Amino acid sequence: MPSAACYGCFLHLTGTSADAPALLTTVAQCFRNEDRHDELRRLWGFTLREIACVGSAEAVRDHLDRHQERIAAFGTALGLTLDRRPATDPFFEPGGARTVMQLLAPVKNEYLHTDGTAGERA
């Protein structure tokens, strides 16, 4: 059972190369196997839409910044305050190499409402 929607995007690009960044979007039914369940804030099963940018570090940063503006404007239009924070994958071993890499080179963002509910990842 997938924990993220983007895996298919990366498999789709296997064996390819490009001079320009690739932008892909996908939706998948995803699942978590975690110790805690926090009502509607942290579900074990959920639908996840991801927009993946595969390219240079600069292209990824530009992608994240562009979406920051769009998501902030969307939240404002709905009357919501959303805070952008680096996102990590809780299914990686705490303190393990993958978790450390996500903290050192943040390429995923999570947008949280003031009550802690995650609203969007970019």
Image: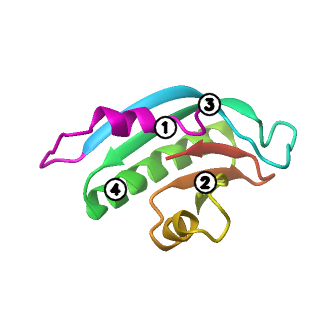
Q: Closer to the camera: disc 1 or disc 2? A: 2
Q: Which disc is residue 66 wearing?
A: none
Residue nearest the viewer, comparing 78 with 46? 46
Residue holding disc 4: 60
C-alpha separation, residue under disc 4 versus residue under disc 1: 14 Å
Which callout, 2 or 4, points to the residue nearer the camera?
Answer: 2
Residue 108: x and y in percent read: 50, 55
Which residue is at 87% across, 38% downward?
39
Between disc 3 and disc 1, the foreground one is: 3
Residue 17 part of the magenta segment: yes
Secondary structure beneath disc 3?
A: loop
How many marks overall? Answer: 4
The residue at which mark 3 appears reads as 1
Stretch of the chain drawn in magenta? 1-21
Residue 4's quadrant in the figure?
top right
Q: Measure the C-alpha gap from mark 2 to mark 4.
A: 18 Å
Identify which amino acid the numbered label 4 is placed on.
Val
For label 3, count other residues whose C-alpha is less than 10 Å away and answer few (under 14), some (14-19) or many (20+): few
Secondary structure beneath label 1: strand
Residue 13 place in picture, x, y as percent: 27, 37
Disc nearer the start of the sequence (3/4): 3
Q: How is the image coloured?
A: rainbow
Indicate yes or no whether the magenta region holds residue 26: no
- Local packing at callout 4 (Cα closer than 10 Å; few below 14, some 14-19, many 20+) is some
Q: Amino acid at mark 2?
A: Asp
Q: Kindly report the distance in space between the C-alpha atoms of the residues bearing marks 2 and 3.
A: 15 Å
Locate residue 87, reporting x and y percent: 58, 57
The residue that appears at 69% across and 42% down in the rendered structure is: 79
